[in-house]
Every structure is written in C-alpha cells, then in structure tokens.
C-alpha cells in the first residue's frame, strides 16, 4: 500500500524489545523511519514509555504486532 501523505509531516518509530526477527534490518532500509530496539523483553508499556519522550507532535498512535 502506498501512503499519500507528506513525509515531512509523518514520523514513524518502531519500538521493539526482545524481538528476534529481522526488524532492525528491515527498518534500516527505510531512512525516514526510526528504530528503538533493545534486546531484553520488558513489555509493551515499558516500550511505550521509552518512546514517549521522542514525540513533539500533538498526536501519537500506538499499534502492536497483535493488532489486526
């Protein structure tokens, strides 16, 4: 799917903890996206709390791998 939205107004941050897939490798192919990865698993709330200080936008949307 192609997103028709100005990239200058979009900030995508992937937050992972304890994942063993190739997320860092995949995200590195897209320079407009940022990855916050830590090897130990601490849970979704810890990951969300780790990312919140990076946002300066009025809206933040969270999703996870279990979201359909």
Image (tube, rainbow, N blue to C red):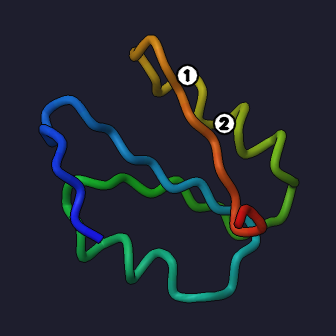
Left or right? Give the position of 20 relative to 58.
right
Percent x, y of residue 24: 46, 75
**Frontmost residue, 64 versus 47:** 64
Q: Which residue is mark 1?
A: 53
Left or right? Give the position of 29 relative to 7.
right
Q: Residue at x 81, y 49 (%)?
A: 44
What is the quadrant of residue 68 in the picture? bottom right
Q: Is residue 5 above or below residue 22?
A: above
Q: Residue at x 47, y 27 (%)?
A: 54
Instruction: Report crowding for label 2: few under 14, some 14 to 19, many 20 or more residues within 10 A (C-alpha).
Output: few
Q: Are marks 1 and 2 in contact (CB under 8 Å)?
A: yes
Percent x, y of residue 7: 15, 42
Number of marks present in the image shown = 2
Q: Residue at x 64, y 62 (%)?
A: 16
Which type of secondary structure does the marked residue at label 1 adopt? helix
Q: Residue at x 32, y 38 (%)?
A: 11
Which type of secondary structure does the marked residue at label 2 adopt? helix
- Rounded to the nearest whole Å, what is the CA distance between mark 1 and mark 2? 7 Å
The circle on residue 41 is none
Q: Is residue 32 above or below residue 8?
A: below
Instruction: Report crowding for label 1: few under 14, some 14 to 19, many 20 or more residues within 10 A (C-alpha).
Output: few
Q: Which residue is mark 2?
A: 50
Q: Quadrant of the N terminus?
A: bottom left
Percent x, y of residue 67: 73, 62
């Amino acid at each position: 799917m192609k997103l028709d939205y100005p990239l200058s107004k979009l900030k995508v941050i992937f937050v992972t903890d304890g994942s063993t897939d190739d997320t860092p490798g995949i995200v590195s192919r897209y320079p407009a996206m940022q990855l916050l990865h830590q090897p130990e698993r601490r849970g979704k709330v810890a990951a969300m709390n780790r990312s919140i200080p990076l946002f300066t936008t009025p809206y933040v949307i969270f999703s996870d791998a279990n979201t359909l």
